[in-house]
């Protein structure tokens, strides 16, 4: 099957996925982690048996502690999320939990609102800065191939593919109700790095083939470059996804969403560098030629 | 630049040329060079094994060589506290210094816990200054917070002449206004007994700067009281009789002997130069940490195993060599984590696993090229060299972009993200070395001349087709 000739089909698939992701984002919204909102999260287990959640909820309202979430974890585990707690309030929460049975606290995290605000700002800065740095780097690395498409367009196209790769897993997380925390942000940034990896490998081959200039249209050369790199792209993503699959299945609860974000992001990233980025170059080239 | 080539340099030069410059060498390269490549390959293997032994020593290790991994709080368990430091009372020029002082004081307090490696550091957030305290292996957060946070904050205040009597009745504390003199200028504190009454008091000595300030304040307030506040509460307000030089002052109050002793000790271990507020707290139990470590380790092992199987089945002999190079890569990077030392966290281990994927990528790129060149009918020797040379630009460019990402992550990330970025970044650098230099040396060393006749193309083929 010709990739470039059928590019509209691949564009449609991407547009559908992005639209689905965006609608999930709009309808469900993002579930921000305690580090971003400035909340407190307490995890622990009851040694003997766990009291009913409604019972615990009532004790919290009696103690005038506002709950954001109260959930069960595993057999006898419990998960409490509230607004930021200082140490005195933390002890109060513990007293409430301990009044219901023998309770062992396993982890406690409480971030003030200023910490959350700073984290959000840093996350956004990091993502924007990475995108910008990547455009500049690609424009520089491909500066010798400014015909028929300027090297800045290469950078821009790579970033369009990246935006696609960031939107889809984020939409999935919104839909699943998974937490968006700083670990998720680092997963996203890794996906950015990986997707650019893939895109650059195809572009690199395109650069080489253009230089050889053995005749043929830009579309033909792009098609050939894609075919020459597709095995590598899929093999690399496969090995990485397999390794991440191990993290997903055996890595424990905290790293599971992280691994999922990476698996989805890298799959989508591989798709976009083969079926979106290079075809887009051809579309832009055609469009310019017409003008 | 002129280099006088000694014998040794001359011996190394051919290697440098082949690795640094892209010198194409065909089937003609000399036997002597070939033997050298085998020695080099052996050397790389030995280095890898030594690194592996350093990472996971089993026998005959000396104390100095047995360096443990440094584990983060999420793997070891412990407490992480973040405080906001209120520097509004400090002149802008002296803030950095005050913050350093604060860190030193907290560090001294934290040392009471006997933690092996307490981490206390200052952080500049966008609109506030912070102090981050990490205590690995400490689980009693309440006590820790008390010991750190309840360090007395000492202030000296003078009478505020502009306060009306009505406000004073409503709020007696409004009658005092702050002076420059705080615990920041304290040198020592000691408990003393009044020789006649036997009532305990605390004598304090200021440093040179503090002594001067104290002199000025006492001079300006003769006949008026100066109040001594501890943690925002006035404890005594003696009236100034005369200008006091030499920087000594006495705090009297209704102290019992024990109270005075504890207060003096706390003041000594450091009165906080600026007030602090706890704004973030994390505590992880050891069981949770150990479980996470075990799981991360297992996940890494399984991930590595899958990659090994894939590489050997798909790329055969080069795949096997790449797997050995991958083994060297893992030993080298883990050894590096021990030496630097890098604090390993859950996210950091994920970074290591991910960098394994990236290390494999470089080899996949090279082997796909090698296969292509073979299909074009090149000889094996040429195909190997061409494969490396042509794949180099994409390996270089793609890894550079990943390094840029890791750098940005490291700069903007929280602790967890920083750990991830650091292991990923180091991993990329080490993997570039092993995937290119090590794999190439191994390939050169194994293929030998007899392969040239094309007797064993299967070994260099790939996929499920038999060439």
Image (spheres, coloured by chain):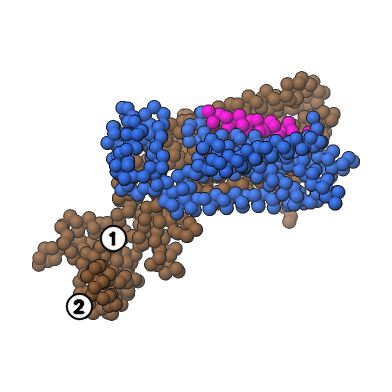
Chain colours: A blue, B brown
Query: Which chain does the residue under circle 1 lie in?
Result: B
Observer able to see residue A61: yes
Observer able to see residue B45: no
Residue under pointer 2: B241
Q: Position of residue B203 (x, y in %)?
A: 22, 65
Quadrant in which the N terminus of chain A is drawn: top right
Choose top left, top right, bottom left or bottom right for residue B312: top right
Are dots 2 and 1 on a single chain?
Answer: yes
| Residue at 73% in and 38% down | A11
Q: Position of residue B84 (x, y in %)?
A: 40, 56
Chief secondary structure of the magenta span? helix
Q: N-terminal of the two: label 2 or label 1? A: 1
| Residue at 48% in and 40% down | B345
Please check the rendered image and state whether residue A244 is part of the magenta-colored stretch, yes or no. Answer: yes
Disc tally is 2
Instruction: Provide the secondary structure element on which disc 2 rests.
Output: loop
Gap between marks 2 and 1 measured at Cα: 26 Å
Residue under pointer 1: B231
Q: Position of residue A272 (x, y in %)?
A: 70, 39
Query: Which chain does the residue under circle 2 lie in?
Result: B
Q: Quick one: label 2, few (<14), some, or many (20+) residues within 10 Å?
A: few
Decide if residue A126 is on the left or right side of residue B341: right
Is B182 located above or below residue A233 in the figure? Answer: below
Q: Comparing marks 2 and 1, which lies closer to the viewer?
A: 1
Instruction: Provide the secondary structure element on which disc 1 rests.
Output: loop
| Residue at 48% in and 56% down | B125
Closer to the camera in the image, A35 or A107: A35
Q: Which stretch is magenta?
A: A227-249
Q: Position of residue B136 (x, y in %)?
A: 39, 42
Is A130 located above or below residue B292 in the figure? Answer: below
């Amino acid at each position: 099957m010709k990739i470039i000739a059928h590019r509209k089909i691949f564009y449609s698939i991407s547009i559908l996925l992005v639209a689905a992701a965006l609608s999930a984002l709009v309808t469900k919204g993002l579930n921000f982690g305690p580090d971003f909102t400035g909340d407190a999260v307490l995890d622990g287990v009851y040694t003997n048996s766990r009291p009913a959640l409604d019972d615990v909820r009532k004790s919290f309202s009696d103690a005038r502690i506002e709950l954001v979430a109260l959930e069960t974890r595993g057999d006898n585990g419990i998960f409490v999320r509230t607004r930021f707690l200082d140490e005195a309030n933390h002890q109060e929460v513990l007293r409430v939990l301990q009044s219901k049975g023998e309770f062992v606290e396993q982890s406690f995290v409480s971030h003030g609102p200023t910490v959350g605000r700073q984290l959000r700002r840093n996350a956004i800065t990091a993502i924007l800065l990475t995108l910008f740095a990547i455009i500049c780097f690609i424009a520089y690395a491909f500066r010798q191939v400014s015909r028929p498409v300027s090297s800045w367009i290469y950078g821009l196209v790579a970033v369009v593919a990246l935006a696609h790769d960031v939107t889809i897993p984020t939409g999935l997380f919104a839909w699943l109700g998974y937490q968006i925390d700083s670990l998720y942000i680092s997963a996203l940034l890794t996906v950015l790095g990986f997707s650019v990896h893939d895109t650059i490998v195809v572009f690199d081959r395109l650069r080489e083939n253009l230089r050889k200039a053995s005749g043929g249209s830009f579309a033909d050369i792009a098609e050939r470059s894609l075919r020459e790199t597709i095995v590598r792209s899929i093999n690399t993503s496969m090995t990485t996804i397999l390794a991440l699959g191990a993290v997903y299945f055996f890595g424990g609860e905290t790293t599971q969403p992280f691994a999922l974000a990476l698996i989805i992001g890298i799959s989508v990233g591989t798709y976009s560098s083969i079926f979106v980025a290079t075809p887009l170059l051809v579309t832009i080239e055609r469009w310019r030629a017409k003008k | 630049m002129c280099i006088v080539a000694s014998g040794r340099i001359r011996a190394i030069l051919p290697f440098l040329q082949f690795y640094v410059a892209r010198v194409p060498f065909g089937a003609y390269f000399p036997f002597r060079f070939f033997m050298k490549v085998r020695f080099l390959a052996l050397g790389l293997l030995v280095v890898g094994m030594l690194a592996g032994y350093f990472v996971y020593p089993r026998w005959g290790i000396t104390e100095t060589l047995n360096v443990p991994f440094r584990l983060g709080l999420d793997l070891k368990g412990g407490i992480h506290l973040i405080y906001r430091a209120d520097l509004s009372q400090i002149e802008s020029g002296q803030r950095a210094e005050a913050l350093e002082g604060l860190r030193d004081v907290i560090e001294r307090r934290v040392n009471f816990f006997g933690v092996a490696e307490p981490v206390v550091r200052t952080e500049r957030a966008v609109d506030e200054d912070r102090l981050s305290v990490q205590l690995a292996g400490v689980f009693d957060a309440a006590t820790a917070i008390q010991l750190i946070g309840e360090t007395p904050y000492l202030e000296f205040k003078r009478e505020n002449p502009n306060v009306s009597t009505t406000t004073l009745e409503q709020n007696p504390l409004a009658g005092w206004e702050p002076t420059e003199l705080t615990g920041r200028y304290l040198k020592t504190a000691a408990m003393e007994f009044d020789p006649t009454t036997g009532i305990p008091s605390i004598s304090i000595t200021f440093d040179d700067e503090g002594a001067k300030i104290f002199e000025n304040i006492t001079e300006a307030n003769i006949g008026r009281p100066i109040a001594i506040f501890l943690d925002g509460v006035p404890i005594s307000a003696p009236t100034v009789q005369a200008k006091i030089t030499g920087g000594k002052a006495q705090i009297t109050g209704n102290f019992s002997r024990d109270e005075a002793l504890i207060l003096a000790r706390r003041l000594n271990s450091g009165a906080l130069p600026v007030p602090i507020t706890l704004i973030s707290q994390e505590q992880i139990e050891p069981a949770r940490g150990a479980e996470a470590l075990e799981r991360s380790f297992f996940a890494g092992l399984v991930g590595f195993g899958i990659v090994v199987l894939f590489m050997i089945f798909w790329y055969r002999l080069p795949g096997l060599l790449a797997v050995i190079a991958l083994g060297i890569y893992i030993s080298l990077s883990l050894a590096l984590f021990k030496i630097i030392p890098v604090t390993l966290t859950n996210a950091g281990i994920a970074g290591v696993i991910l960098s394994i994927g990236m290390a494999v990528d470089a080899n996949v790129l090279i082997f796909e090229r090698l296969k292509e060149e073979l299909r074009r009918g090149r000889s094996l020797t040429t195909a190997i060299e061409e494969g490396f040379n042509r794949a180099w630009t994409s390996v270089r460019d793609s890894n550079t972009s990943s390094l840029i990402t890791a750098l940005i992550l490291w700069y903007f990330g929280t602790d967890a993200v920083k750990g991830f970025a650091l292991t990923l970044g180091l991993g990329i650098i080490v993997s570039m070395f092993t995937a290119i230099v090590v794999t190439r040396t191994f390939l050169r060393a194994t293929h030998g001349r007899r392969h040239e006749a094309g007797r064993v193309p299967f070994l260099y083929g790939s996929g499920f087709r038999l060439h």
